[in-house]
Amino acid sequence: MNPLKKISYNCRQATFLIEKKSITRISIKEQFELKFHLAGCSVCQLFEQQSLMIDRMVKRHFFTDTNENPKLDDDFKKALTKRIENEMDKQ
C-alpha cells in the first residue's frame, strides 16, 4: 500500500504520533504523515486537542507549587453516590 494512503487511513498510527510528539520530537517524515492524516480526520484532530489539554492540566497539577488540594463538590459527590447506588440496585 502507498505510504500516504496507509497513514491517511490509520488513526492508530496518527494517535501514536500525536502522543509521541508530546513526549519527544518526531521526524520530518512523521510530521508530514501526521499533518496529512489530520488534514482529513476530524476525530484525530479532536484527539490531539484533548491530548494537549490533558497534558497541560496534568503538568499544571503536578508541577506547580500551589498547596491546592482539588476536591469534588459535595453536591457532585452526593449525585455520584446516588447514581452508583442506583446502578448497584439494578444488578
Image (tube, rainbow, N blue to C red):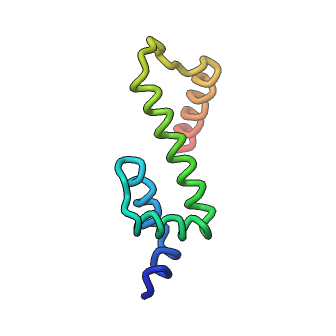
The foreground one among 87 and 80 is 80
* Residue appearing at x 40%, y 60% in the figure: 16
Question: Quadrant of the rendered structure where residue 77 is?
Answer: top right
In the depicted structure, whether residue 39 falls above or below residue 69? below
In the depicted structure, whether residue 86 falls above or below residue 28? above
In the depicted structure, whether residue 3 falls above or below residue 56? below
Residue that protrudes farthest toward the front in the picture? 28
* Residue appearing at x 42%, y 67% in the figure: 13
The image shows residue 32 at horizontal and vertical percentages of 48, 68
The foreground one among 25 and 45 is 25
Residue that protrudes farthest toward the top in the picture? 67
Question: In which quadrant of the rendered image does the N terminus lie?
Answer: bottom left
The image shows residue 72 at horizontal and vertical percentages of 55, 21
Residue that protrudes farthest toward the bottom in the picture? 1
* Residue appearing at x 52%, y 38% in the figure: 88
* Residue appearing at x 57%, y 49% in the figure: 49
In the depicted structure, whether residue 43 falls above or below residue 6? above
Q: In this view, does 35 lie to the left or right of 65?
A: right
Number of numbered labels in the structure image: 0
The image shows residue 73 at horizontal and vertical percentages of 60, 19
The image shows residue 59 at horizontal and vertical percentages of 43, 31
